[in-house]
Each structure stands twice: as C-alpha cells, then as structure tokens.
Amino acid sequence: MIKLYLSFLLTALLFLKVCEVAAFQSSDSLTTISFLNGTEKVESMFYKLKLKEAQDTSTTNSDAAHLSQLLNRVYYDFERAVSTRDSLIHAGIENPRIQYYIFDDAKDFDEVIDYIAIIKKNELYIPKTEKPQTNEELIIAANRIPFKPFYQLRYKIFNDIKFIILLGILGLFLITFLALLFFLVIARSKNAKRKKLIKEYKLQCQTPISSLIFEYTFQEIESMSFEQLSAEFGKSNFEKALFKDTLIKEIVNVNKNLKGDFKDKLRAIYTILGLDKFSLLKLKSKKWDEQSAGIVELFEMNIGYAVDQIEKLVSSKNFIVRTNAVRAVLHLSIDKDLKFLAQQQYPLSKWQQMSIYRVLKNIPKSEKLDISILLDAENHSVQTFGIRLVRYLGKIELIEKLSSMYNHVSYLGKQEILKTFKALTAFSELELVHRILMETDRNLSLLASNLLADIGNDESIEFLSTKLEGSKDFKLQKSILTTLYTLDEQRFEIEVQKLNQEHIDLIKNHIKDSLLSYV
Amino acid sequence: MVFVDRIINKSPYFYLLNDVKSAMKDILVIEDDLLILKMVEFRLKKEGHKVILAEDGNEGVKALEENAPDLIITDIMVPFKSGIEIIEFARAKYPECPIIVLSALGEEEGTVMEAFNLGVADFVPKPFNPNELAIRVKRLIN
C-alpha cells in the first residue's frame, strides 16, 4: 500500500512539474514585450544595441563617436532601448537590434521569455510610474510596487487552480492512505483478538470433550440434558457464537480422527448442545464460506435430518457450496436418490466428480443406487459422469443402456462408453464396436480397435483388416496391428506382408519385441 | 520359604502390584493437533502412564534429549521436523525404545514404509480408536 501511495505521490509531483512548464510556456512574446515596456528595471537584466556584423559604421552620416557611445550604453529600461533603436533606424542605420543580457550573458528572446516568467512569479522588477523619477531612494522605488499583504498572497496561492488540484489530489491520497491504514490496523487488531479468543476457547473445550468421551458411556451422554452438558463447558459460553463455532470445529476435528463408539458420543454431545441447529443456521447465511462450513459440519456429524435443507444448496451459484452440498446429500440421504444430481444445471468439474464418487463408492452394496437416472440427464457433464460411474462401480446391467444411448451422447460420452465397454469387457456390444471402428473419427476408431483386443472375434478380424487397408494414420495402424496380433497371429503376419511397407515392418518388430510391446 | 513365595506369587495382589509397576511408564507423544494430543494424553494417563507432550518436531527432539521415554508415539507430519527425522533421532539415542506411528497417511505410503524400515514397532492409522491405541501401548510396553 505504501508503494502505491509513493507512486501516486510521484505522479502528483510529475503533474506539478508539467503544470509549471505549461505555466512558463504560456508566457508568449507579446506579453513579455508589454511587460518589458511597463517595467523600469528587471532584476539582473539589461539591454544593449547592436548592429549587423557586416555593416560598416564609417559609411553612415552620423557622428561615429556618438554612435559608438550609443552602442556601448547599457539600458535598464526596455522602452528607452527601443526608442534609441528607432532613432538609429531614422538616422539611416540599417537593422539595429536590441541584445538582451541576463546576469551579464547575452541571451536570445526565448530565454528572455522564460526568465521574465520567473521574474513575474517572484516579482523581482520595478514597474513604471507616471512621473519620471530620478535618483530616487530604494525605499521610494519599493513603495511604487502595489502593497500586497501576506493574506492576499496566500489567497493568490490558493486562487491558482492547478495548485488547488494538486493539493486536492495529494490530500485525497493522504486521506485514502490514512483511511486504509486505519482499517488495516482495525482489521488486524480484530483478527488478533479473534484468534486469541479462539485459542482460549479451544483450551476450554479440550478437557471437557476428553473427559466426556472417555469417562462416560454413550448411553450416559445420551441421557444428559443440555444443562448438564453445557455446565461442563461453562454455560455462559453458549451465548457466544464464536465459542459455539470453535466447539463445533473441535468436535468435528475429533470426530474425523477417532473411530468406534467415540463418534456416537461426539454426535450425541453435538446434538444435545444444540450445535446442529447452529450449523443449520449457517446454511441460511448469505456468505458462501459460512454455508459451506455448515454443510461440512452437518456432513461430518452425520446429521441425516439436515438433508432437506442442504438439498436446497445443491444448485448454488458457488462452486464450493454446490460440491459440498451434493456430497453431503449423497452421504446423508437414506434413499440415495440421484435425481437432484441429474437435475444439476452447472457442469460437473473433475474435482466434483471425484468427491461425489468418493461418497458413492462407500455406499454399502445393500443400498439401492440408481445410476441410470444420471445417464438420462440433460446436462452432458452429469451424463458423462454417469457413464464413468457405470465403469467405476462395475454396473454391468447398464451396458445395454449405454449401447442404446451411444448415438445421442456427447463426443466425450462416446469415448467414455467405449472405455466402459473395455473395462467391463462388453462382449454383447460387439456389433456397435465394429460400427464405431469403421467410422471416420480417428479417436473413436482407436478406442474401438483397442477394445476389440479384449472382446473381438473372427468377424472383428475382418473389420480390422478392412480398416487397416484404408488407414494412413500411424497410431491407428499400430493399434489395429496390435489388436490383430492379439486376436490372430497368423492373420497379423498376412496383413503385414500384404501392406509391404517399411513402417509397418517397424510396427511389427515393435509389437513382437517383448520388451517394447508395452512402450 | 518356597511355599511362602508360591503363595505371594499366586496372590492377586502380586499381579496387581506387577501391573501397577509395568503401567508406570514414560510415554512421549508428538502430535501437532492439540486436541488429539490431549485425547491421547487423557487416555494414557487413565492407564497410569506419565505422558510427555510435544506439539512439533523441535519440541519432540528436545523432549527426547531431556527424557528417556519407554515408548514414543509420533505423527509423521509434524511442523519443523518430520516424523522420520524424529524416528531416526530416537532410534540413534534409544535403540530399544518402541515407537508407534500415528498418522493419517495410509500404511502403503512411502513415508510410512520408510518409518517401518527405520524400526517402528507399530502403525496406527487415523481415524483411530484411543482404546485400541492404549491396548497397543500396553502390548509393546509389556
């Protein structure tokens, strides 16, 4: 943040510099001339008259000595220098010019413009008055400058719009910086206080949890009332949301790490203390992290009656909430109805599929799990996941359904179906696989050829042979030859000879080499 | 005299005395999860053991330098020093001291295999049953 602030400050200074340059440039030649005309003397600046270098002064009619005197004279009053120059022009001298001197150095007019801009800003000049005054005292000359008291000067400073803008920007940055710093400090102190409290509450929870689960039986804990149990933790603590939240986290943590009847004891403590209601309240929160925490708590503590409320979140816009909700519903629901998953609007990511699969694979075989509902889903990702589940869970009874839906699924779904056929050695679907092999799609043909190595028959050899003849793709040729070699070694040799190509011989050597065959 | 000895040896109080003597062991527990640490302490103290607690690898090594435990229970994933480093240190200092690894890692994980190669006596996967752990401790101590 400090870096950002410094960069802003640097930008502001740059802006100031640009303004300054712009201000100087705004003084043009006309305003400079009129200023010089109205000035009796400019600090450290004087003028001299010069003639063109090539001009011969001796040829003029004027007195040479007088001319030399005029040319050597130093003028502090610009108007006098101009009138002298004009009189020289009248006298027939061609192109006399005024040479400007600043700090005794000859300068051109552009440099004079810049110098005058500085002089004007700093008021280092004596303006002209009506009465010509000579030999006046410094004090009198000073009096001729209009009196400008300090407050007027200050007013002038603030009247400068650029300066105000700059001050405004700097002020704004300063205020923003201070505000951010203030909020940062407040947030940090709040966070530190919260962490300290959590640590304190954790210590308060540890001993009662340990003593309850080790010193009491499940029946004893279950028969306890809220008053009895809460007395162990300090009854007043249950008015604080942070304490309840810490206690839930500790219970869930122990529940994750322990097994046996300790889980039942922890669940009894959780429900008797009304912490399930606290977790259920989190589901109604507008914050996704709280919703997610609530779902995880209810899932970990195996609170079956929360299914209806969690199910409302399976179509949440938030990816984490959605994933946790689906996982929790699958784990907690008794009937294991996957209808809600089939109705998902959002695509299922690989991570979601993995987490759902982890729940599904642990469902006892005795419980009915109807995956076919996922195969009918309109959501392609859900449908593809359904096909994968058929493979992962070994649902052989759904092979026929997969075959019938092949033409209507996505490209990825088609690939998954072929992989599933291979995993489940679907001999019954040979006809479909032959058809896929003969299709023009290279990837599907590859999968089909690979699959035929497991389920192929004599008819498959003919199909493979036809496909090999019409194929130019190296990978496909290699796959078909590998399958042919697996199905019929003699036919493999015949096909290699028939093709009579160098790279086919190389493939053959590769397939027949026991070391290279798996590469 | 032999008769008296036999009477004493067969007395239930003799076994009780023996049990108390064998139960009074120093057990070092290294675990970064404070609540689990407390649970194990609670359970082992119930058995009458003296439990030394360490919340991280550094504390574990320090405890090993200051005490000569009769048994060590350690997690594999602890802050500052890995469980393997702790096991190596313990093996070098107390070659006879049995070590139990308590970890959420699977038994087939490389780190756990490495621990077994270093001479770990037992492996308890998480989630675990504290009663089962207490029985394993008892078996190793006796």
Image (cartoon, coloured by chain):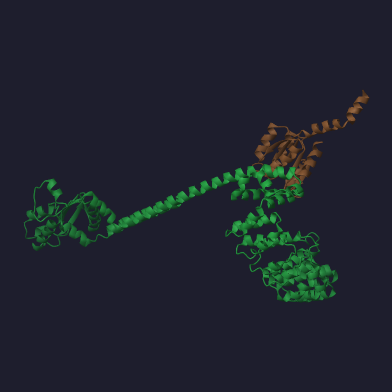
- In the rendered image, residue A224, in percent from the top left (x then y), is placed at 71, 48
- Whether residue A471 is situated above or below residue A152 in the rendered picture: below
- Whether residue B101 is situated above or below residue A513 in the rendered picture: above
Chain that is coloured brown in the picture: B
State the quadrant of the C terminus of chain A.
Answer: bottom right
Query: In screen coordinates, is A176 left or right of A317?
Result: left
* Residue B4 shows up from this direction: yes
In the foreground, B66 or A250: A250
Query: In screen coordinates, is A273 left or right of A424?
Result: left
Chain that is coloured green in the picture: A
In the foreground, A342 or A458: A342
Image quadrant where residue A470 sits = bottom right
Q: Residue furthest top?
A: B1
In the foreground, A62 or B120: B120
Image quadrant where residue A213 sits = top right
- In the rendered image, residue A494, in percent from the top left (x then y), is placed at 83, 73
- In the rendered image, residue A504, in percent from the top left (x then y), is placed at 76, 69
The residue positioned 68% from the left and 60% from the top of the image is A306
